[in-house]
Every structure is written in structure tokens, then in C-alpha cells.
Amino acid sequence: AQSVTQLGSHVSVSEGALVLLRCNYSSSVPPYLFWYVQYPNQGLQLLLKYTSAATLVKGINDFEAEFKKSETSFHLTKPSAHMSDAAEYFCAVSEETSGSRLTFGEGTQLTVNP
Amino acid sequence: EPEVTQTPSHQVTQMGQEVILRCVPISNHLYFYWYRQILGQKVEFLVSFYNNEISEKSEIFDDQFSVERPDGSNFTLKIRSTKLEDSAMYFCASSWTGPYGYTFGSGTRLTVV
């Protein structure tokens, strides 16, 4: 069965600082991995996805994530935080055998301080 | 950019009442989904729908829930007899190719009183 663990329910950074949001997954088959962002009172917006191509994935708004099979990780990073990055971030996993359901992590609330 | 549209954005219903949440998926998408997010918790899969039938459902999706694609454009989630614990944000999603191309709607906040 697939699962996702996001380390840190709340992360706080200063504007301009590096953003690092951690995600570890468990999957019995090669996974597909995703990061979604949710702004207050809005839906889920896809930031980036890993689907077994390049291990370093670039997404929107300068976010990127690296798939590390040996560490079963898919951490999200951004070199320089903006105030507008304040939101909740969800890591998700899907296995091709699961009928394409997404299993989400608990989410990480990112706060950006001026 | 094509969108998944959900209506209403907020619905309040009394416990025990039936409620229907509506979604208009992206027109050329083939896979349809419902997820829910209880306040402060993670997003949970409810059901997937493909080729006019349920392809997968979670343990949450019991006999109180049903889905339908009545007219080739709408995709609905019905809860027959709502409970307090059904209060949540319900997200519809559609995809043309499984998990790779999901588009989520902005959600319907259901409040059961």
C-alpha cells in the first residue's frame, strides 16, 4: 500500500530564504509523486510531478523536487521564498496499480516572514 | 486554461438530509474523482469513475455515497443521509490520463448541522 509522510506540519522561513519541505513515501512499485499547493479557501494546484523521467523535477514558481529512490524521498525546494508562497503544501503518491488514486500526506503549512 | 467547476461553493444541510454536490469536469477528460478534506486534515480519496462506472473506491465511500454522470458533462456526488462527520471540503477532479494529468476543482464546503 502506498503512503506519504511529510515531516513538519509547519515550516516558517524568512523572505528570500531557502524553502525545504520534506516528503517521504512508501510504495511497493515505482511511484508517481506530486506536490500540490493549496492557498486559503482554494483548490489544489499542481506544482510539479515525477513520473519516472528525470529525477530532478522543475515546477511552477521556481519550485523543484528531487526523487531519491535510495532515501524514498521527494523533498520540495525553492531557492528564495516570496511572501506569496505562504500556503499549505501537500505531497502525494500514486501507483499505477492503484487505479490512479492519489494518496496525500498530512500537509505542511508554510509561513513566510518579512 | 480549462477548469473543473464545482457548485455550490458552500452548502449547509441538516443532519439526515440528502445532498448532491455537482461538478463539471474538463470536457475531454476520461477519469473523474471525488476527494474530501475534513478541516485541518489531509485530503482523502473517495472514489474514481471511468467509462461510466466506479473504478475504485475507498473505505470511506460506503452505501451512503453514490456518484453519477447523468448527462455526459456533469459528475455528481450524492450523500443520502448526511452525518455531522460528513462536514468537509469536497474536491472533484478530472484527468485525461490517470494520475499524471489531474485538475482539481476549487471545492464545495459542506457543513452538516
Image (spheres, rainbow, N blue to C red):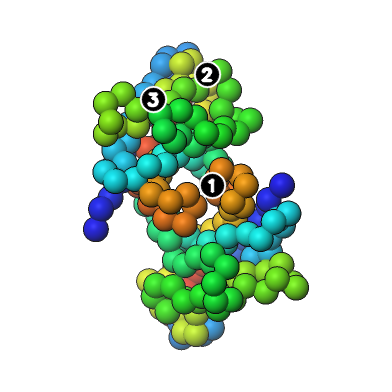
Badge 2 amino acid: Gln
| Marks 3/1: CA–CA distance | 19 Å
Q: Chain of mark 1?
A: A
Left or right: B75 in relation to A8: left
Badge nearest the viewer, 2 or 1: 1
Q: Chain of mark 3?
A: B
| Marks 3/2: CA–CA distance | 14 Å
Badge 2 marks a residue whose secondary structure is loop
Q: Which mark is residue B68?
A: 3
Crowding near the residue tagged with mark 3, few <14, some 14–19, many ≥20 C-alpha atoms within 10 Å: some
Badge nearest the viewer, 3 or 2: 3
Badge 1 amino acid: Ser
Residue A44, how many percent across, how many down? Answer: 42, 54
Left or right: B19 in relation to A111: left
**Considering only vertical position in the picture, is A7 above or below B79?**
below
Along the line of sight, the residue nearer the viewer: A45 or B67: B67
Q: Are marks 3 and 1 in contact (CB under 8 Å)?
A: no
Q: Chain of mark 2?
A: B
Crowding near the residue tagged with mark 2, few <14, some 14–19, many ≥20 C-alpha atoms within 10 Å: few
Residue beneath label 2, please? B64
Q: Is the same chain shared between marks 3 and 1?
A: no
